[in-house]
Every structure is written in C-alpha cells, then in structure tokens.
Image (cartoon, rainbow, N blue to C red):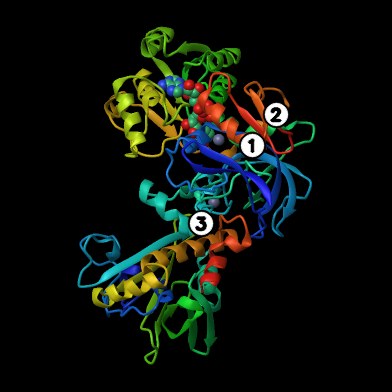
Amino acid sequence: MRSNRDLKTPASVVGLGLAIGGIAFGTFLSRRRKGGADDAPVYARKSPPGDHSLVGRTVTIRKPRAELYSFWRNFGNLPQFMENVEEIRENGDTATWVIKAPGGASVDVETRVSDERENELIAWRSTDGSDITTSGRVEFTDAPGDRGTRVSLIMAYDPPGGAAGRALAKLFLREPQVQARHDLKRFKALMETGEITTSARRRDQTREAKQQENG
Amino acid sequence: MMRALTWHGTHDVRVETVDDPEIINSRDAIIKITSTAICGSDLHLYDGVIPGVMPGDVLGHEFMGEVVETGKDSTLKKGQRVVVPFTISCGGCFHCKIQQFSACENSNPAEKQDMSATLYGHPMAGLFGYSHLTGGYSGGQAEYVRVPYSDVGPIVVPDHLEDDKVLFLSDILPTGWMGAENAEIQPDDTVAVWGCGPVGLFAVQSAIVMGASKVIAIDHYPNRLALAKQMGAETIDFRKTDVREALMEMSGGIGVDAVIDAVGMEAHGFAADNMIDIAKQKIGIGADRAKALKQAILAVRPGGRVSIPGVYGGMTDKFPLGALMEKGLQVRTGQTHVQRYLKDLLEKIEDGTLDTTFMISHRLPLEDAARGYKCFHDEQNDWTKVVLKPDMEMAK
Ligand SMILES: NC(=O)c1ccc[n+]([C@@H]2O[C@H](COP(=O)([O-])OP(=O)(O)OC[C@H]3O[C@@H](n4cnc5c(N)ncnc54)[C@H](O)[C@@H]3O)[C@@H](O)[C@H]2O)c1
Ligand SMILES: [Zn+2]
Ligand SMILES: [Zn+2]
C-alpha cells in the first residue's frame, strides 16, 4: 500500500464544499498533502503556501476501511449525511448532484471520478461543461489497533473566488469548511450508530425538516 | 401537549405547556416520567452561569419513568420501568467502547459541536436538559421525554424498588461514587469532601463503602452537615473553623490523602478573591469561583489525589498551579460516565449497601417545580434534594 506521502494526485480539491457550489476553485495542491518542514498536513499550517485557503478535516470512525469506502463510493448514499445535497444520481461514469438552493430551487452539478483506489481514496471533479466548478477528495487509512479508520477530507479555494464564494455560501447557510466538518461528523455518526444524531423533540423540529421547510 | 419546566433567564423558570416529544430515530424511546429531581447542576443554569441555555429549553437530567413508545431498534419494551442516565451515549464510538461514556463522540449533534469545541478544544457529549453546548436536548422535568440511543443508556429497574430508591442512579449517585473512585481511596486513607449537597453526601457514603478510614465533610449548612455525620463522616463548618488547619490536625499533621470537590463553580465564601470572582461571574467575564477547589489543593498531602465532580464551565483566576506541581498531585475529574456504574450501583441499592433516600427533603408536583428551584436555591439548609412527580396533585 502506498502511503499518503507518495500521492501525486492533482488535488485541486474541495471536499463537501461541493454542497454550497459556486466557488471558483483554483488549481492548487498539486504536490503533496503533507507540504512543509514538518509532518503535519499542509492545511494545518499557520499560513498555507500560495494564494489559497485550504481546509481539511480528519475523523476516526470505528468501522473497517472497506465498509466506509464502499458506502462513500456509492454516491447515492451521500445525501444521507450531506446536508445540502438533495440527491445524487449515478449515470455511468458521471454523477449528477442535485444541490439545494435558496427558495426551494436546486442546482445540478455533474461530476466525474478523477481518481480512485479501492479502500483508499476517492476524488471527484465537476465535468467541463458544468455550471459550477468543484472537486472533492476523501482518503481512508487504517487507525492504529482496533480504532477503525481515519477518514480525511481536503478542501482548497482561492481568495478571489473564495470571497465571492463565501458570500454565496452564506446564502446557502454556511461556510464550506463548516459544512464539510459537519457533514463529516454526520458521516461518522451514521456509520457508528446507524443514525444521524438529533436533539430535536419532534420530527418537524429536526434540522433536516427545518431546511426542507426553508427550501 | 404536555407540561414541562422551561428556562427563561436567570432565576426565571416556569412550568408551561409544550409539544409532546416524538420518536425521531429508530433507536429512540419515549418515557413517561414518574419521578425527576432538581440537581445542583440545574442551579448553575438557574443562576445563568452556564453558557448556551436558551429561553424555552426544557430542563431536567435526573429522571425515570415508564417506556411508552419505542423506535424499531430500541431494546426497551413498553411498560418497562427505567432510569435514564443524564449523559447521552451512542455505544458505538471509541469513547463509548472504552466506557468513557460522557465523552461520547456522536451524541452531541454535528451542528451543535462547534461551540464547546471552541471553548474546550473538543466538543462535549450530549446531556439531557442542560445547554446547547451539550446538544440542547429537552430534559426530563416534564411529563414525557425523548430518549435517543435508548438501547445504551436506560437501565430497567425491578418493580419492588420504589422510584425514590433508584431515581438517583440517573446522576448524583454514580457522580458521588465516581468522585470517590477518582480519589483512589485506600483502606487507611483520610479523605476530605467539600460540599454536603447530594453529590458530596453520596461521595461521603461511597468513600466509606470503599473503605476509607476517615471521611471529613465540609459545608456551612448545619442540616447538610448533620446528614453527612449520619452517613458516618466527621464534619467541619467552614464558617466557624479554619478548614486547612483543622484538616492538618485531623489527619495527624500529614494532610488528607485525597480531596473531593463536590461544590463546583459557585462556591460560597467571603474572602476577597472569592468576592472578585463573584463580581466577574456577574458581569459575564466568566471567572469560575473555585474557592473550594483551591482550598482542597492546598489541604491535600504531597502525592495525594484530587477528585473534582463539581462542575466548572470556564476559566478561573489565581489557580494554585505551583502547589499542584510541587506537591506532585494527581487530578481526576469529568462529567460522570454514568452507564459504567449502573449495574453495580443498582445491586448495592438492592442489597442495602447504599442508602439513596436519606437526603430527599421535598417531594413536589411537577406543576410546582419553579418553587422547587427557588427554595433549593435560596434555602439550601433545609432543601437538600427536591424530587418532582408529574402525577402528584398540587396542594390547595
Ligand atoms: N461531574 C458530574 O457529572 C456532576 C453531576 C452532578 C452534579 N455535579 C456538580 O456537583 C456539584 C454539587 O452538586 P449538588 O447537587 O450536590 O449541589 P448543591 O448546590 O446542592 O450542593 C453544593 C454544596 O456545596 C456547599 N459549599 C459551597 N461553597 C462551599 C465551600 N467553599 N466549601 C465547602 N462547601 C461549600 C454548599 O453549601 C452546598 O451545600 C455541582 O457543581 C454540580 O453541578 C457534577
Ligand atoms: Zn444532576
Ligand atoms: Zn459514543
């Protein structure tokens, strides 16, 4: 198995920021995930190299790598924990993501898997003709002992588009990194507990229900 | 619709009509409450010193009742009597697997985790009826409550044990027990407990059951000190006696082997530093009043153990860090891992090792809960523990 360090994927990246769409992502991160003087992931650096903002997030999930990988690789599953994604339809080697927009509208994005290695990583990117430019990448590695699997999501965006993107993100509820973090935590909860945790007292008070309502 | 105790601001709680809870997820259960208690932790909410409580929130984290509805993956059955731990735990994450239930990674909903993660470096687990830092779950000072992960938390209790005997399994009994366990009590130990509220009283009793040779309880309310004495402790009234000097004398000049802070962030005291801390807490710059804890750290012997079941929420000033390091102390604390202790403690209640009812001073209808809060807060000497019963009639 190759380690993260050897990955030479053009990770122009962006994780679940997908869900908010509209961000002009710069191509970046072409070298490695770990990018500097120390062993920390590049997105943990105080000032990430280049003009780009970069976020990433890792969670450990107490489930085998293969199980998590295959759940994620079946894109139709993702809307279960990605809050702003209504539906993902797979059509051959592309997939259409239906993303919630304000006022009950929705935006379609077509993506293609740009890189994948069984039980290790899945990267995807919007196709050339797509209205929204976006890409995402998720990596699965074994956690020590019986602690399960480390799941990392990386995301980068450049400030000019990023600023506009963030403004847009506000419209769509929240910043991409927050969105990504929450989606990833929900993925963890779903895998470890079989459900998405809610503190609501009634079905019509869950976050999901409220969002449907607001459109 | 149901009746429930709701929070509206500092010293403003009301019994109101709110929507009934529903099953939302498949592991949920709905419990019809038969008994619920007011806790010292609720007083921190009442005093407005815990952040993230919102108007309309239903409080209450010590409760028990009857299962009336179950999701398809709940292991509970309708009609069972259960006591529900105040900590919500999923059973599937790393922390649940190693029995650190109050550090559950999934029970606080993803979108609610940011606040406590910012404050503490990590998100807190979900707790019933407490704060939106801990999920914002509706609590059990109500007629009904939704219990998530009902296959993990609730313990079924036998019918021959009445509510008053088992209710405190939900929090204060395991909290007192874990407080004593964290003090790693050895047979010849002298142990000091600050605070003779319910948590302190259970810590006293637990320390004695664990074999401490002497337990010294500290408070200033005569009635609460008397209860500690009744449990087998020696007592110190901190208003009348110099606590540190007394503890040195009572431990033969060595210092006590272990100390337990069952007071928490609203310690009473009139020393200048405590008054400054009260002022800071009032204007919201969040200095916890750690008077009891500071005193405990100075009183414990070198190499001794410090156990902190008392709740703290923020920062504190002038913390005796030097004493902690130079004396080589061990510190253990945390919200209680309730589920870890339930089976064992239920057995100890059944066989009479632990007395759980001696501290109950008042039983009120749920309808009268606001008065319960006021009196438990204002008249601590006489109001030692308040149990609320939804089906009790209001006195005319
Ligand atoms: N760790 C947990 O999971 C957990 C669970 C339940 C309660 N708690 C906490 O435990 C603490 C006690 O709870 P309780 O229900 O017994 O509360 P309580 O308010 O009934 O009792 C606190 C007692 O401490 C006494 N006290 C105040 N200042 C003191 C001082 N300087 N020295 C000695 N005694 C002093 C008070 O007179 C009072 O009797 C609270 O902070 C509560 O939030 C923690
Ligand atoms: Zn409590
Ligand atoms: Zn858990």
**Is label 3 within 8 A of ligand 3 (CB to nearest ligand atom)?**
no
Mark 3–mark 1 Cα distance, whole angstroms, equals 25 Å
Residue position marked by numbered label 2 in the rendering: B165
The image position of residue A145, as x and y in percent, is 47, 54
**Do the residues indicated by labels 3 and 2 lie within the same chain of the protein?**
yes
**Is label 2 within 8 A of ligand 2 (CB to nearest ligand atom)?**
no
Q: Amino acid at mark 3?
A: Pro
Mark 2–mark 1 Cα distance, whole angstroms, equals 13 Å
Badge 1 element: helix
Q: Chain of mark 2?
A: B
In the displayed orientation, state which residue is furthest to the front.
Answer: B396
Residue position marked by numbered label 3 in the rendering: B109
Front position among marks 3 and 1: 3
Q: Could you say which is closer to the camera, residue B100 or residue B389?
A: B389
Q: Residues within 10 Å of mark 1 (few under 14, many from 20)?
A: many
Residue A173, compared with residue B272, is above or below; it is below
Who's the residue at 66% across and 60% down the image? B26
Q: Amino acid at mark 2?
A: Lys
Q: Residues within 10 Å of mark 3 (few under 14, many from 20)?
A: many
Q: Which mark is residue B342?
A: 1
Badge 3 element: loop
